[in-house]
Image (cartoon, rainbow, N blue to C red):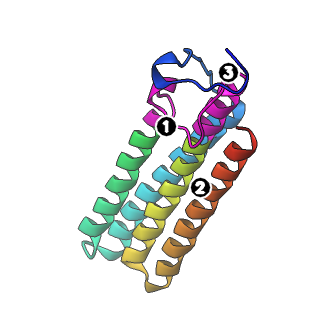
Amino acid sequence: MKRNSTYKRSQLPDVKFHPGTPERLMEAVALLIVIANWAYVVYMRIANGNEHFADGCICAGTTTFSFIVVALCAYAPIKLINFPFSPRPDNIVTQYVLSVRFIRIVNILICLCTTATTLAVYHDWAMPLVYVAVGILIAATIAYIAVAYRHR
C-alpha cells in the first residue's frame, strides 16, 4: 500500500491492544467513582431515611450501567471503532491506542457526571458540578480530536 492510502473498514488489520498500567489505573479510578457513588447513596439512606432514596438509587444505577457499557467499549475490536480520521497503514496502531485511551477517559468523566447528578439529588449546591463535569468531557473530546488530527 502507498503511504497516503487509507484503510477501508473491511481491510483493517486485527490489532490487539493489551491494556497496560495506565489503562488499568483509569479503569480502577472509574470503578472507585462508582463505588463511592453507591456508598454515598447508602450513607444518605442511613442519615436521612427514605427521603430521595429512590432518586439516589436511580442515579447510582445509571452510573453503574454507564460504567459497564463504556468499559466494555474499550475492549471493542478495531473494526467497530469509528475513527475521527481515516487511519493509514503507518498510523493505525497509534489511532487505535488513542481511541481506546479516550474511551477510558470518557468512562471516568461520565462516572463523574452521574456522580455529580447523585450529589445534586441531595444537595442544591452540587448542580454546578454537573455542568463542570460536562464541560471537562467536551474539552477532553476536543483534545482527543486535536491529537488524533496531529497523528493522522
Amino acid carrying label 3: it is Pro
User: Mark 2 or mark 1, which is nearer the start of the sequence?
Assistant: 1
CA–CA distance between discs 3 and 2? 24 Å
Q: Which residue is mark 1?
A: 82
Q: Which residue is mark 3?
A: 89
Amino acid carrying label 1: it is Asn
**For numbered disc 1, what is the local secondary structure?**
loop
Vertical order, 111 against 46 (above or below): above
| The magenta stretch spans residue 76 | yes
Q: Which residue is mark 2?
A: 141
In terms of image quadrants, where is residue 103? top right
The N terminus, quarter of image: top right
User: Mark 3 or mark 1, which is nearer the start of the sequence?
Assistant: 1
* Neighbour tally class for label 3: few under 14, some 14-19, many 20 plus, Cα within 10 Å: some
Q: Position of residue 106 (x, y in %)?
A: 54, 50
Vertical order, 133 against 88 (above or below): below
* Neighbour tally class for label 2: few under 14, some 14-19, many 20 plus, Cα within 10 Å: some
Q: Is residue 51 left or right of residue 21?
A: left
Residue range highlighted in magenta: 72-101
**For numbered disc 3, what is the local secondary structure?**
loop
* Neighbour tally class for label 1: few under 14, some 14-19, many 20 plus, Cα within 10 Å: few
Residue 78 appears in view:
yes
CA–CA distance between discs 1 and 3? 16 Å
Q: Residue at x 34, y 55 (%)?
A: 62
Vertical order, 134 against 89 (above or below): below
Vertical order, 46 against 101 (above or below): below
Q: Nearer the viewer, mark 1 or mark 2?
A: 1
